[in-house]
Image: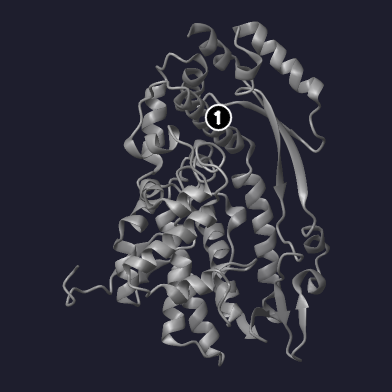
């Protein structure tokens, strides 16, 4: 333990907001914990830097930024007469600080490949409970707020809702680092308009245009950054690399990997593993982008043609070709591609499905069915933003857009398969 006289009121210099201060000693201790320090080694946007070279910021950056915005939001809410105790303030800041602590390397790649039936939200909860034990129950209220089990719902809504500090930070931060200006939002203006009515977070009506811009920015950032077709191609390539590595590992093939990655490749782990075996969480806490990146570099030379070809493609940025459209791709279209690659390379149809596959993506900028962004008018009336907005496109943005895509190999992938 550090000496109690040690100065824990540190200041971080953030490229987006400037100086970020730490208001509580406990927050400093949580940030210093290895579980949280791991976030420095996990990129916020996974492989998006293959499209936008500046997108190399980390989940550590984002967690600190979201906490900073939450501090500002709590100040505004208190200034308008809403009582927030020191204990509640500390717990809310801890909840937002740890909201993404369960993310693994390359975001969702692990959820679909080497661990099963467990989401990053589940793992965040496991981490928080473990930290609560280590900090002798000091995170109990933070966990209640995180899980929406505390009586003041607006505190949870600051952490997780359609207008939470998580979204306000990642839109502004991701826009800053990618250079995609469509994501720029006025987070200061939005926060200054926050209020609480009947226990729930609301926006004062004069902030309506800032909220409209926020919703539009979110839709545009999803199409231009998070669901950019080249980003999708790269992410699916990582998923398939890890799936193939897992398949080979479970059949006894020897693969280069770090101890943490080996634990997940050579054994099956799911939500129950995290719940019943403390080692699983510890091993997961040792996984970061470097484990995956180093392994992929080494697997380029593996004797398995499929794994080797996939890894060479990622390392050299020879990604899948990808076509996106509104209509789903037929079995006949997929089978035509499968036949072509099987004929050209001699691999089996099962192996060819690592190179040819189809899926769908969804973009829903605002979903009033889930929870609402409510506007508070001077007469005390509350209206949902979609009902109150005078721009017709806000109503349109409540509709979920679904697109279908197909991935298939570039010629260089085929050549890699042939040469191995």
As displayed, is residue 366 above or below residue 155?
above
Residue at which label 1 appears: 240
Other residues around mark 1 within 10 Å, as few (<14) / some (14–19) / many (≥20): many
Q: Is residue 419 above or below residue 288?
A: above
Q: Residue at x 70, y 57 (%)?
A: 365
In the image, 89 versus 265, the foreground residue is 265
The part of the image, by quadrant, that contains residue 233 is top right
Q: Is residue 53 left or right of residue 380?
A: left
Q: Position of residue 198 (x, y in %)?
A: 67, 87
Judge whether residue 330 can be spotted in this image: yes
Asked which colour scheme the image uses, the reply is: one colour
Q: Residue at x 21, y 74 (%)?
A: 7
Return the residue nearer the eye: 21 or 209.
21
- Compared to residue 319, the image places residue 191 above or below, namely below
Residue 166 screen position, x and y as percent? 54, 63
Task: Place residue 391 in its image quadrant.
Answer: bottom right
Q: Is residue 139 left or right of residue 243?
A: left
Q: Position of residue 143 (x, y in %)?
A: 48, 70
Identified at 17% across, 77% down, the residue is 5
* Residue 52 appears in view: no
How many marks are shown on the rendered structure?
A: 1
Q: Quadrant of the N terminus?
A: bottom left
Q: Is residue 118 above or below residue 66?
A: above
Instruction: Find residue 102 and report its horizontal and vertical position in percent.
Output: 47, 54
The secondary element bearing badge 1 is classed as helix
User: Closest to the observer: 53 or 47?
Assistant: 47
């Amino acid at each position: 333990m550090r000496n109690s006289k040690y100065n824990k009121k540190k200041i971080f210099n953030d490229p987006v907001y400037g100086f970020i201060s730490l208001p509580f000693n406990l927050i400093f201790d949580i940030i210093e914990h290895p579980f949280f320090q791991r976030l420095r080694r996990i990129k916020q946007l996974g492989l998006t830097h293959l499209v936008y070279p500046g997108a190399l910021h980390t989940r550590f950056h984002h967690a600190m930024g979201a906490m900073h915005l939450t501090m500002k939001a709590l100040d505004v809410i208190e200034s308008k007469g809403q009582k927030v105790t020191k204990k509640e303030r500390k717990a809310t800041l801890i909840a937002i600080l740890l909201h993404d602590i369960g993310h693994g390397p390359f975001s969702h790649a692990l959820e679909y490949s080497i661990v099963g039936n467990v989401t990053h939200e589940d793992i965040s909860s496991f981490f928080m409970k473990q930290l609560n034990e280590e900090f002798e129950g000091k995170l109990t209220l933070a966990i209640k707020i995180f899980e929406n089990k505390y009586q003041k719902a607006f505190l949870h809504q600051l952490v997780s809702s359609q207008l939470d500090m998580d979204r306000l930070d990642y839109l502004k931060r991701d826009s800053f680092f990618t250079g995609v200006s469509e994501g720029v939002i006025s987070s200061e203006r939005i926060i200054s308009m926050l209020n609480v009515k009947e226990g729930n977070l609301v926006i004062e009506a004069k902030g309506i245009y800032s909220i409209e811009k926020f919703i539009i920015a979110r839709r545009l950032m999803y199409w231009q950054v998070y669901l950019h077709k080249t980003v999708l191609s790269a992410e699916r390539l990582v998923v398939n690399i890890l799936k193939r590595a897992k398949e080979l590992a479970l059949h006894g093939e020897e693969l280069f990997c770090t101890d943490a990655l080996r634990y997940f490749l050579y054994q099956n782990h799911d939500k129950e593993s995290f719940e019943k075996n403390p080692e699983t969480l510890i091993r997961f806490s040792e996984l970061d982008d470097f484990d995956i990146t180093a392994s992929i570099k080494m697997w380029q030379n593996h004797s398995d043609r499929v794994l080797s070809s996939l890894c060479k493609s990622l390392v050299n940025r020879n990604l899948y070709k990808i076509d996106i459209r509104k209509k789903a791709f037929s079995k006949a279209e997929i089978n035509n591609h499968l036949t072509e690659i099987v004929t050209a390379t001699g691999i089996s149809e099962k192996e060819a499905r690592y190179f040819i596959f189809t899926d769908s993506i969804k973009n829903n900028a605002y979903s009033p069915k889930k929870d609402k962004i409510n506007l508070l008018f001077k007469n005390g009336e509350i209206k949902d933003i979609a009902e109150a907005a005078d721009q017709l496109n806000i109503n349109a943005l409540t509709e979920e857009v679904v697109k279908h895509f197909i991935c298939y190999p570039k010629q260089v992938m085929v050549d890699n398969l042939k040469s191995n």
